[in-house]
Amino acid sequence: MANPTSSDSRKGSITHVIFDMDGLLLDTEKFYTEVQEIILARYNKTFDWSLKAKMMGKKAIEAAHVFVEETGISDSLTAEDFLTEREDMLRSLFPTSELMPGASCLIRQLHMNGIPICLATGSHRRHFELKTQRHGELFSLMHHVVLGDDPEVKQGKPSPDIFLAAAKRFEGGPIDPQNIIVFEDAPSGVCAAKSAGMIAVMVPDPRLDSSFHGAADQVLSSLLDFNPSDWGLPPFEKVAS
Ligand SMILES: O=P(O)(O)OC[C@H](O)CO
Ligand SMILES: [Mg+2]
């Protein structure tokens, strides 16, 4: 997959890292897919990856509007009712959330090597708590967490709001966006990171159309493939994952 070119002027200037959560650190996108398939089946429609690509990474209500409008069911189901309907199902699934491959190791390596890290997720507080309840120790390594319902996040991804808020809250912030790598799985998240002036390393689901890869500075198959030297970072010491 695409790698930064050796002439990339930002190579060697990385000081901070921002992580997305759903689909990047946690294998939670499958839960959204599952419940949305169930809801759409009632209308004899199928949920596909072109619609998924438009929803993922967004705040819940923004994604809900995309869902009912793109599928043509908005006369029968409002965005608000869609959120209410999927909530019960999601609430029982989120506490079972598992880490994506390489997530624990990369977070621990960055933390151990003194690189400040934080989380910037479109998820609101209630969902964040459910999704991370089995992973509290790992997420406590984040310097801070910015959630989709944070007052400073006026608009969800692809707006840069969430990443700019995240850059402000590091020690000595705001950190120059050019010195920040954002890890993202969603097209909207990559777009938000680029709009914020940051470097976007994309780890997309293989089912996402590859036309979305072009906006990212680097595309990886897995977090396991991240090589710090690609960005001029010193080699990581090995940690137990
Ligand atoms: O990918 P995240 O972490 O910004 O989360 C966004 C939604 O909650 C799920 O697509
Ligand atoms: Mg995501």
Image: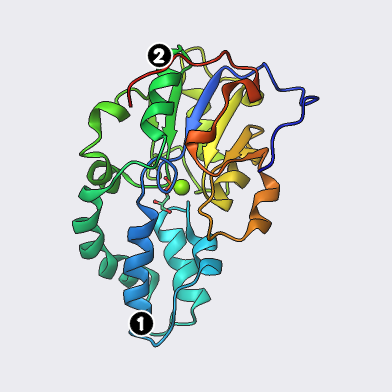
Could you say which disc has been placed on residue 41 in the image? 1
Q: Nearer the viewer, residue 175 or 152?
A: 175
Residue at point 21%, 39% (across, down): 133
Residue on which the image places disc 2: 112
Q: Which structural element holds mark 1?
A: helix
Residue shown at the point (33%, 41%) measured from the top left: 99
Task: Tell me the residue at 30%/43% (across/down).
Answer: 128
Task: Judge left or right: residue 132 versus residue 144.
Answer: left
Q: Quadrant of the C terminus?
A: top left
Position of residue 7 relative to residue 76, above or below, is: above
- N-terminal of the two: label 2 or label 1? 1
Q: Tell me the SS state at disc 2.
A: helix
Answer whether residue 143 is visible to the viewer in this image. Answer: no
Spatial separation of the CA atoms under disc 2 and disc 1: 47 Å
Q: Please name the amino acid that badge 1 sits on.
A: Ala
Taking 198 as reference, is 239 left or right?
Answer: left
- Dividing the picture into quadrants, the one containing residue 148 is top left
Quadrant that contains the N terminus: top right
